[in-house]
Image (spheres, grey):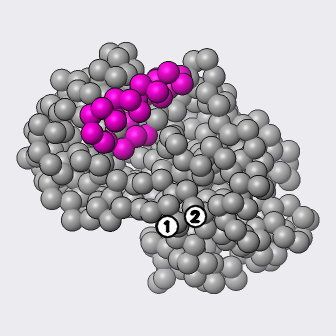
Amino acid sequence: MRITEIRAAGLRGATPRGGWTRELRADDVVHTLVAVHTDFGLVGLGSVFSSESLVKSALEVLGPICVGADPREPDRISQLMHENTFWLGRGGAITHTISGVDIALWDILGQATGLPISTLLGGRYRDRVRPYASVLIEDAPVLADSLGKLSAQGFTAFKIGWGTFGRVDDATDERAVSTAREAIGPEALLAVDAGGSDAFWAHGFKWAARCADMLAAYDVAWFEEALRPDDIQGFIDLRRVSKIPISGGEVLTRRQDFFRFLSAGAFDIVQPDTTKGGGLSESRRVAWLAEAFGVRFIPHGWNTAIGLAADLHLVSSLPAADLVEYKTGSAYIDDIVEGGFPLDSDGRLAVPTGPGLGVRPNLDALARYAPNHGLFDV
């Protein structure tokens, strides 16, 4: 079996707001699907947290490395892509695109063997995973209403963040956290994401330490991206004084970047994004590193249905991982695969059991959000 072609198509028309300083619009493309074609007729799907134009440009470099290779060797091909783009990659669009190709290759291996990716990654420790609903912070009444509805749908874990957090004043931040805790009740998991990877993030260690004390009073499960993403020393210092776990890592790529933070003791929880950091092959290496350093692993996932399916398989295959991020209200999760991702009565998501990713694309939805995509054309 050989790879014959790799195609890409960006999703547009229903892009959710991101909470960024330069806010996203519905037609902005920040998620791109990748389809790897083979001479056996199998097509694997992957997802990249990047724009269509960047992914297509990266594929001009990566395509010649992949075409002609056996797609049933996802880890080897991913390493070939990393090693042969040393001067062009080591992060950014190249590594982001490798992520989507890698996910697609694991999907093909699963289809070829008739096994789900979670089994191929070494085995399933669980058949269900607890999702946490990821919600942007808005005015208190809007936030309370949103969280109340999600709680009624069955979610038992939540993360609030970005929006006004850290961008107005301390009282506004505490009001948001207090509102959230009241809306979801004392038993539900609540995490807070400051969004320190936003453009020109203004806060440093002292603000983060003061904020962490406030969050501890509301039994917050973790404090995410409290500092700018390259501030290793700041994270080390914050972790030493914080009463609650400190998390980060969603913008890091490749195991080498994560090793620097993990070996320095920067995080209690590490959060690689499988659609940016190097795909499933790289995310599981980060998970192994995290285990060795005694750090909890919770993947970041401002995602598509393809990325969410990949995260479910990944978490299923790790003995200590038990949470995935779920971007609520996104058509790119809810609509583009058949059946979506319904919660069960315990607020869990089933890990797909079919071959590969175990999800089937909804072609009508893809035609709506990726017009003329051509991902599956023969």
Label 2: how many residues lie within 10 Å, few (<14), some (14-19) or many (20+)?
A: many
Residue 190 position, x and y percent, is 35, 29
Q: Earlier in the sequence, mark 2 or mark 1?
A: 2
Residue at 46% in and 27% down: 149
Residue 119, labelled with which disc? none
Report the span colored magenta: 134-159
Residue 101 position, x and y percent, is 65, 65
Outermost residue to the right? 40
Relative horizontal placement of residue 10, taking residue 300 as reference (left or right): right
Q: Check the picture and name the quadrant holding the N terminus.
A: bottom right
The kind of residue tagged 2 is Arg
Q: Nearer the viewer, residue 88 or 217?
A: 217
The residue to which callout 2 is attached is 12
Q: Is residue 101 visible?
A: no
Q: Nearer the viewer, residue 294 or 95?
A: 95
Say if 53 sits above or below 74 in the image: below
Q: Quadrant of residue 147?
A: top left
Q: CA separation, marks 2 and 1?
A: 6 Å
Q: Is residue 179 visible?
A: yes
Label 1: how many residues lie within 10 Å, few (<14), some (14-19) or many (20+)?
A: some
Is there a contact, CB below 8 Å, between mark 2 and mark 1? yes
Q: Secondary structure at mark 2?
A: loop
The residue to which callout 1 is attached is 28
Tell me, yes or no, whether the highlighted magenta stretch contains residue 152: yes
